[in-house]
Amino acid sequence: MIRSGLPLAREDSILIAFAQMKGLLRTIPQIRNPYGKCGTPLASEAGLIQKISTPLKMAIVLSTQSLSDSLKSPSGRFTIYYDKTGANSATPEYVDSVAHFADEAFELEINELGYAKPPYTSADSTWHISLSNLGPGVYGATAKSGNAFAKSPSGLSLFRSSITISNTFDSGFVTRGTDAARITIFHEFHHVIQNGSYGTNFTDDAFREMMAVWMETRSTPWVTDYLQYLPSYTLHFDEPFDHIENIGYYGQCIWMQFLAKKFGDDVLRHTWEFYSDSFPDYLLCFDSVLAKLNTNFCMEYKRFGTAVYYTGRDFQGSSLFPDARKFNADEVQKRILQPNVTTIISQAFDASLHIFVCGFGKDTSVIVISRSTDRAFNSDFTVTSKSVLTFQDSFQFPETFCDTISLPVLIATKIFPQPYILTSSSDQPLLNILASTNSYSPIATDLNIYALDNTLIRHIERSGVTLSADPFGGSWYVEWDGRDDTGRLVPSGVYFYHLKIDQDTDNGKFVVIRKN
């Protein structure tokens, strides 16, 4: 069928791609692995097909490749299998590098980061790593060995595993040579840990891959191979977090980067432990682990979206992402809002992310919206085509604002109301200037307000400042009553403010309209 150019059923495509990854069926045209860089999901799906397939298909899945030579790693924990000649040949230097990388992976992932040690591949008390000529663009794969040997407390199957990686990384890869071999070993050994120490099912490929790619960045920060997959994630923020299209789950490693940088490496291991021990739904596991840190998935996913926005050309000088400058701002899904123009979200999926931007340069506002993870019990707050959110405010000042869609609400801006309309009535509204986006109020606050000619109109020190909490949480504002230092209402005009918040400063301008 493949030689005649006839279309293949997905089952056939998966089996042929898997067989070619294992060194079989080389005489027919190459079938590309639909899962991208890692062959582990391909092996997992092929294994699932095996259970319902003919003996011939089972033979393809269960076949093994014979490699003539082997080398123990310096620690004796790994056996590297390779050929000295032929399609699967590898140089002695390359084999030696792989052996050392494997030992480093054990030291980092087991001894330093504290992940549970998985069982060895076989009775020889080593983990097996084969060097093979894999399919185009496939860096490596981790295959389960035999049947499950146990179940985790949450009901996930536990397996022994073996690793296969490319024997050369000489062409067809974004990252080549020993750098590619290094990140692949750390990536695939984490799959061995996942399979043997925590458990797996056939619906968690995204969780497994985002974690394994994070391990690449954790172990080898100078290699940024993951950037090639980032657009497949950031351009699909509006999809549910656990159903990102195509190969976006590789790019989701930046979510892991965000969590590890903010809360420490342990938060990722705790998520795996909760997944294995308590509840086999990884999205709710994030929520449960974050709850112990007095936050939740929804809140952190919003903050994560804000951090992603301020990368690339919008980089602000510091970031939770180590390669923030290298992100492509054009490959982050966002919608541009026009001031005073109503914008409607017609649908927002659970655990999805939406970034809205208004303004240019420093006069930019960013609104990040995330949905709850609780798909079963939070339906009253799910936004569908019948329940929409309307933004009713204009955005003219630089700041980040996050809020969860629940009911139509007015989104606060950097300084509001804008323009500031003054009247002599007793219920005169206050001007609110953002002082902090933390959950706690600033220790020190000093506000100066100037007229257009730079004349100081009002000076308010900490002792005289009233801080107003954002009704949606997470923000604090300095309030001004529109009066100068003598107590008189100021006239209409353009005004500037200079705000010192603890050790930081901020400046901005606003318009006052005096009605009487």
Image (tube, rainbow, N blue to C red):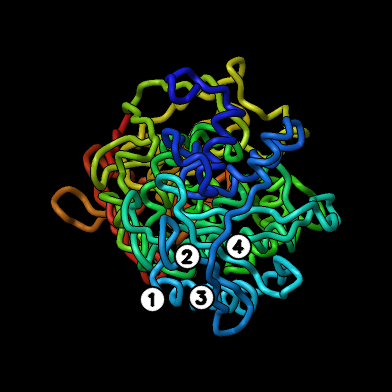
Three-letter residue code for mark 1: Glu
- Looking at this view, is 69 or 120 the one in front? 69
Q: CA distance from mark 4 to mark 2?
A: 25 Å
- Looking at this view, is 6 or 278 the one in front? 6
**Which numbered dot is residue 99?**
3
Outermost residue to the top: 386
**Which numbered dot is residue 335?**
none
Q: Secondary structure at mark 3?
A: helix
Sequence-wise, the earlier of marks 1 and 2 is 2
478 to the left or right of 105: left
55 to the left or right of 20: right
Does the residue at mark 1 contact the one at mark 2 (Cβ under 8 Å)?
no
* Percent of width and height locating residue 399: 37, 48
* Percent of width and height locating residue 497: 28, 54
Does the residue at mark 3 contact the one at mark 4 (Cβ under 8 Å)?
no
Q: Secondary structure at mark 4?
A: helix
**Which numbered dot is residue 93?**
1
**Pointer 2: what residue?**
83
- Looking at this view, is 320 or 152 the one in front? 152
Sequence-wise, the earlier of marks 4 and 2 is 2
User: How many numbered circles are shown?
Assistant: 4
